[in-house]
Image (tube, rainbow, N blue to C red):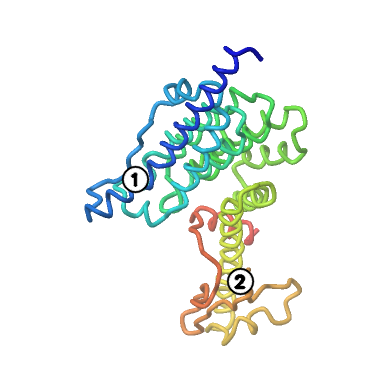
């Protein structure tokens, strides 16, 4: 390496070091100023660099390294819920942070995949912006057209967050045609396009995400959705059986154990965390116990209708 090249390399590293130090100090400096002022104002959600192209130019040839910093900043921004509670818009800058991260390093697949969950999940768990989630995934697909996982995630956004089953099925069918795509994508697409079996498809989606995600927070979110679906299927089944019992006997049974005693099919009296369901024999209502350790996430009412229709058949 000649002196000119060595000098340029040294200058580049010095510039990057200064940039990273300054970027890292933004958050502590902002926190210190807010602490001294005592009032963060109506919205303390500031983003000092909002243009991906500008940050890309400033990064010179060190984009991937700086992308790791921005990805860490994105995770912190998403994960600090107490800060999100103080913002006028909980995750206003989340799309910009993800855009900058994936512009600096277009090969950071985890930023597309986990980022789409951060954006798509409804508030307060996420930003509640499924269209931004699709935009991020489309960006990843343009950069990695043969990666079936990105199309799978896109179909997931269509199916779960937008309830657009046709686009979900079409997207999964496209993913299934790619090289190295898993065999289960084709039947998943068929179920979505059939407009039936919504509960089973939803459970399969969350199970796949739980098994394949590399991030603990995404896996925990998927597990909570899985537990919620399992619990509601149990409760809907009990409600159906209780109404049949009442029609035959004129009153509800004293316990759920009495309701299912002697039946050929086994029924779970405990929720997915092992806590017994609460049952009121006077009203015939079944619910999760206040002592349960599971975190319940809302399940669409339309799933109940489809589930009960299948039971009745």
Query: Counting residues from the N terminus, which is met first, the one under dot 1 or under dot 2?
Result: 1
Q: Quadrant of the N terminus?
A: top right
Q: Residue furthest bottom?
A: 254
The disc at residue 29 is: 1
* Residue at disc 2, secondary structure: loop
Residue 39 located left or right of residue 199: left
Residue depicted at x 72% and y 36%: 186
The one nearer the camera, 43 or 222, is 43
Locate residue 94: give its quadrant.
Answer: top left
The one nearer the camera, 147 or 67, is 67
Residue depicted at x 59% and y 18%: 6
Residue neighbourhood size for the residue with mark 2, other residues' Cα within 10 Å, grouped as few (<14), some (14–19), many (≥20): many
Locate residue 182: give its quadrant.
Answer: top right
State whether residue 47 is above or below residue 85.
above
Residue depicted at x 70% and y 82%: 261
* Residue at disc 1, secondary structure: helix
Q: Quadrant of the C terminus?
A: bottom right
The residue at which mark 2 appears reads as: 271
Residue neighbourhood size for the residue with mark 1, other residues' Cα within 10 Å, grouped as few (<14), some (14–19), many (≥20): few
Task: Report the label total.
Answer: 2
Residue 291 located left or right of residue 92: right
The one nearer the camera, 80 or 48, is 48
């Amino acid at each position: 390496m000649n002196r000119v090249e060595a000098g340029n390399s040294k200058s580049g590293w010095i510039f990057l070091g200064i940039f990273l130090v300054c970027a890292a100090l933004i958050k502590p400096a902002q926190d210190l100023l807010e602490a001294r002022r005592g009032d963060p104002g109506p919205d303390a959600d500031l983003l000092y660099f909002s243009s991906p192209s500008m940050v890309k130019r400033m990064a010179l040839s060190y984009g991937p390294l700086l992308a790791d910093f921005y990805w860490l900043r994105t995770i912190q921004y998403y994960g600090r819920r107490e800060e999100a509670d103080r913002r006028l818009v909980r995750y206003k800058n989340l799309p910009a942070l993800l855009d900058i991260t994936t512009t600096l390093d277009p090969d950071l697949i985890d930023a597309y995949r986990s980022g789409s969950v951060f954006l798509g999940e409804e508030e307060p768990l996420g930003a509640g912006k499924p269209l931004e989630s699709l935009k991020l995934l489309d960006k990843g697909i343009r950069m990695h057209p043969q990666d079936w996982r990105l199309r799978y995630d896109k179909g997931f956004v269509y199916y779960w967050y937008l309830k657009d089953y046709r686009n979900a099925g079409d997207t999964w069918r496209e993913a299934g045609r790619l090289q190295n795509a898993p065999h289960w994508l084709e039947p998943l697409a068929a179920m979505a396009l059939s407009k039936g079996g919504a509960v089973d498809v939803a459970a399969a989606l969350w199970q796949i995400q739980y098994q394949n995600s590399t991030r603990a927070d995404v896996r925990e979110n998927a597990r909570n959705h899985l537990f919620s679906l399992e619990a509601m299927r149990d409760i809907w089944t009990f409600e159906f059986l209780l109404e049949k019992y009442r029609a035959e006997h004129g009153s509800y049974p004293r316990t759920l154990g009495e309701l299912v005693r002697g039946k050929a099919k086994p029924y779970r009296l405990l929720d997915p965390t092992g806590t017994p369901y609460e049952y009121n024999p006077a009203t015939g209502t079944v619910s999760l116990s206040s002592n349960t350790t599971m975190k319940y996430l809302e399940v669409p009412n339309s799933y109940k209708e489809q589930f009960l229709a299948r039971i009745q058949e």
